[in-house]
Image (cartoon, grey):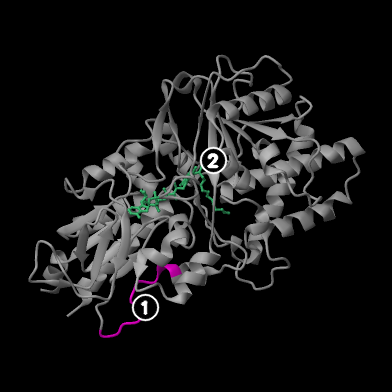
Amino acid sequence: MAKIQGIDSHIVIIGCGIAGIGAAQKLTKDGFKNIKIIEATGRNGGRIKTTTFGNVIVEIGANWIHGPSKANPVFQLACEHGLLDAQAMSKENQALDVGGHPSFQSSFYSSSGKKLTPDLTEPVSQLFLTLLEKSREFFQTEKEPYPSVGEFLKKEIAKHVVEWKDDAETKKLKLALLTMMLKLECCVNGTHSMDLVGLGAFGGYKTLPGLDCTFPGGYEGLIDAMMKGLPEGIVSYNNPVKCVHWNGSFRGANSPEQTFPVMVECENGETVAANHVIVTVPLGYLKEHYETLIKPPLPLSKVHSIQRMGFGTNNKIFLEFEEPFWEPDCEVINLIWEDETPLADVKPDVNQFWMKKIFGFTVLHPPERYGHVLCGWIAGHESEYMETLSDTEVKNSMTEVIRKFSGNPSITPKRILQSKWHSDPYTKGSYSYVAVGCSRSDIENIVQPLPLQETDTKPLQVLFAGEATHWSFYSTTHGALLSGWREADRLITHYTQSP
Ligand code: 6YU
């Protein structure tokens, strides 16, 4: 009986990214009949976004399955739907444990057009990885020596530098290399600076075994496959939600005899009454709109946690070339600006030198599928500034940078495409990170459904999912999917247990 009540309950999911689709998928499988997804844009997938670039397909958003192995539900689904190649699915690939830092075949170019040799780059890369591992050891110890990962790394680097016996030129190059690694880490964490990432919470992010893999036909193939399992017409597109009114007594348009505790008001004036609403909008959107998106307003504990959690920008710049200027086996081209050091506290001139924040380019493999395409990576304020520039301006800057580092004055990219996640009004950045001052309880606060306390009001009116709500897998597609499943399970359990 209780179950039947649940099946008939009206559930609205806000956002058709992988978290929202995952929630809808689980509820549908469990027999819930009245589910509606309301999506602001005209497409499914949110930050999973595949597009074409010339004749090839590229990922504007999520790129890899991080840790493709048994415990990763995105990997499991991708396998079930036959979306991965044999190598990605092999036992050997799943068993590899690289702790979130796959070792790519990398080339290191310096700003004077030199190629750095492994005898210089390998020990420095090893040092950086060791220090990064050490940063995780302060997780929940309350004994962190500095507030941020960045400060810890820089102090540790300073300790090592005094031991270096190299000549001044080599020392300078090693420090420049470490600066590049900090920029790479900003991209991984989706932050402007590692000084913003909290040291005490850093180790809370968990990696899974498996060597990161991509979708040969595009990440969005997974979204398409998941959507096929949902009832037709479940999504209302191009329909931004303006406000979720909760703790009320609202009448439904199609069932005026019934009252509902929640009412979703859309920008176009449409209203949808519901028993439960699952909010999956990105944290970047929530940070900007929490005051108007939820009424009565969110409890202060939630507001403070939303403000404390970090959400930054990581963008991509795709460049296509007639011929490769890199070696055939090269997977990553790293850019080392010789004048940079992590030990100097300089305030960068973002507008003039934004391109110096690019840590390097990944090479799209294999060339038979992608031709000669590089993907540049840039995080933080410089990345947000880049979004204000035209494609031609970005292409000109990229041409200059590549000519400088390769020492070849005639290289010219044929085509360019840049992502613009910060200007996307329904995302406002790329993904979340645990900022200085954050702890696990901030994510727990954000997750807590409304009303907070079980009073005589209706329970589980507003629930929260999305990548930023997963404590150990935040910032990933599998974290987002698991968060959608978690909130669906919360409702399923509620109706299974209720008398
Ligand atoms: C991953 C990867 N990857 C690169 C880049 C980006 C991301 N991620 P969604 O936003 O999808 O859905 C919400 C929907 O809500 C959306 O459709 C909106 O339009 C809608 N909405 C908003 N407001 C609304 C309103 N008012 N009304 C109605 N609808 C509304 N993840 O696993 N592998 O390689 C990358 C990468 C450039 C931008 C990524 C990657 C992140 C994922 O894309 C992201 O988490 C999920 O897709 C989010 O799904 P969702 O449903 O929650 O939201 C140590 C440590 C460090 C920690 N980090 C390590 C991992 C690094 C992360 N990954 C690396 C980055 C890459 C390359």
Q: Is residue 186 above or below residue 276?
A: above
Q: Amino acid at mark 1?
A: Leu
Residue denoted by label 1: 452
Among the 4 quarters of the image, the one containing residue 271: bottom left
Identified by mark 2, the residue type is Asn
Task: In this rendered view, identify the residue nearer to me: 349 or 323.
Answer: 349
- Where residue 185 appears, as percent x and y from the top left, is 63, 47
One can see residue 473 in this view = yes
Horizontal and vertical percent position of residue 282: 42, 55
In x, y percent, where is residue 481?
Answer: 37, 53
Residue 14, numbered circle: none
Residue on which disc 2 sits: 315
- Residue at 46%, 18% in the rendered image: 368
**Mark 2 CB in 8 Å range of ligand 1?**
yes
Above or below 484: residue 348: above
Which is more toward the observer, 100 or 443?
Answer: 443
Per the rendered image, the range of residues in magenta is 446-456
Label 1 packing within 10 angstroms: few (<14), some (14-19), many (20+): some
- At x 9% / y 68%, what residue is drawn? 256
Quarter of the image for residue 108 reads top right
For the residue with label 1, is its CB less than 8 Å from the closest atom of ligand 1?
Answer: no
Quadrant in which the C terminus appears: bottom left
Apparent side of residue 243 relative to residue 343 in the rendered image (left or right): left
Answer with mark 1 or mark 2, whichever residue precedes in sequence: 2
Q: Would you call the spot at circle 2 few (<14 residues within 10 Å), some (14-19), or many (20 or more)?
A: many
